[in-house]
Amino acid sequence: MTSKADPRPKARTPRGFVDRRGDVLRAERRIVEAVSQVYERFGFELLETGAFEYADALGKFLPDADRPNEGVFALQDDDDEWMALRYDLTAPLARFVAQNWETLPKPFRRYAVGKVWRDEKPGPGRYREFVQCDADTVGSERPEADAEIIAMAVEGYAAAGLPRGAYVLKINNRKLLNGLLASCGVADEGQKLAVLRAVDKLDRLGRDGVRLLLGEGRLDESGAFTRGAGLAPAAAEPVLAFIAAGAGGRSATLDRIAEVVAGSAEGEAGLAELDRIGAALGAFGVGEEQALFDPSVVRGLEYYTGAVFEAELLAETQDEAGGGARFGAIGGGGRYDDLVARFTGERTPATGFSFGVSRLAAALAASGQSETSQARGPVVVIALDAARMTDYQSLAAELRGAGFAAEVYLGSAGMKAQMRYADRRLSPAAVILGEDEIAAGQVTVKDLDLGRQLAAGVSDNRAWRGDRPGQVTAPRADLVSLVRQIVGRAR
């Protein structure tokens, strides 16, 4: 915002958006590369779609999305068509499959990586722009396809560096709750959706808060009232009993769920699907401590039709005030057998899982489980004489040709400031080529890592400058070998 008194804009980052520098981006790239390798080992093909989709192609699957620009970032094109930045990578996949179904191998197994955008309230680790890494199978209705997706997710988290016990992958089936509601006389789709949204808030509001949202509604601490699903107590109590049935092993949980949904054809169908998923997970070697059945998991998006999965980080993190906090979900997915049909009119079974890459990277950092050391910067060639810039550039080119990151200092500062620049870049070494070195056919290489290490115990700065620790002058031909020794020690 600007004013007449001060026409300069204020430098600020929009809420829900973050600037990420090299260390964060490298962490995200490492996660993407690790997970992508898992997807490819399972035989999934990489696909990329555009950032924008037509709003009607995305559908209205976000909570309370009553307008094209509610929940998403949308604009009107010059032909008056509404376009929106994609809020996930699944809706674009459904559109792509509908366009290309006749030419695709069936089932179609694809993975995708990219940014998505959601116009939602930001919070700790929850951004309006973030990176997802998805894998989906389109064209298979087998529960074993769901199990394969879950097994890939487990392998993906391990590859990304998340240890066992730091998270758990929870599995449910929408058919179970649908069948239960039908047996309780709840047929209205809007009321069913309100129940799903209430259950989805269990982690945040607890059992009592969900009970209020299943009934008439809930008044929060700010005084705002959220309208409930309007269930009578006789219908709300079975729902609460259902979401509390998840405890212990997968088989024991299925037994408890069976008691709650008995007599419902749809509920029993969902139960049978979970049973087959459990058997397949056993064949995949996915332990019950890694993936469990939890009836409280419903997922927020409306397009799920069967199995749903959600990965929850269990490790404690700290909030902005320094208190303990749980990061919650770091990925999820499920079965969406009706999404392609929005375009074609024909039911096309599909299932998938999405890693929230930005969220996972933030969670790993907050819980102290990510690599905290910054990456090495480039070798810096000190520029002492503008007339010698071609010589400096030749040194840098020689180092890059030998496989090292290298740059020539291109600022206008003096020697001391240049060394400070190299140190700030976490450069492993600085190369100095002055008149004395040129005349003698030599080069000076300063080991900055060693210098940083020794500097911690320095008490006499004068002696330090005189000793010049880690600084070696050698024949010009030895440049690459000198740098290789320094970089090798740093690894």
Image: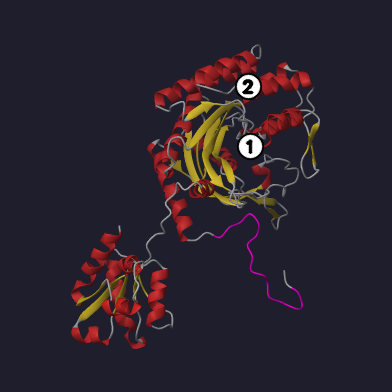
Q: Give how far across and how far down residue 176 sits, in percent.
A: 63, 21
Q: In the image shown, does 481 or 146 lie closer to the viewer? A: 481
How far apart marks 2 and 1 lie (CA) works out to 27 Å
The residue type indicated by label 2 comes to Leu
- Magenta region: 3-19
The residue closer to the viewer here, 422 or 75, is 422
When the figure is inspected, residue 340 is found, relative to residue 404, above or below; the finding is: above
Q: Is residue 163 positioned above or below 386 on the image?
A: above
- Residue toward you, 76 or 148: 148
| Residue labelled with disc 2 | 176
Residue highlighted by disc 1: 343
Disc marking residue 290: none
Q: According to the image, what is the colour scheme of the structure?
A: secondary structure
Q: Main secondary structure of the magenta part?
A: loop
Residue 409 can be seen in this image = no
Res 281 seen here:
yes
Mark nearer the N terminus (2 vs 1)? 2
Say which residue appears at 49% left-offset and 49% top-offset. 361
Could you classify mark 2 by the number of other residues whose Cα lies within 10 Å: few (under 14), some (14-19), or many (20 or more)?
many
Find numbered disc 2 in the image and state the secondary structure of the residue it sits on. helix
Task: Please tell me whether mark 1 sits on a helix, a strand or a loop.
Answer: helix
Which quadrant would residue 256 be assigned to in this image? top right
In the image, is residue 48 part of the stretch drawn in magenta? no
Badge 1 amino acid: Phe
**Residue 396 rendering spot, x and y as whole percentages:** 31, 73
Q: Quadrant of residue 226?
A: top right
Q: Is residue 472 left or right of residue 135?
A: left
Q: Residue at x 52, y 30 (%)?
A: 139
Residue 255 in percent (x, y) is at 56, 15
Q: Where is residue 99, by image quadrant?
A: top right
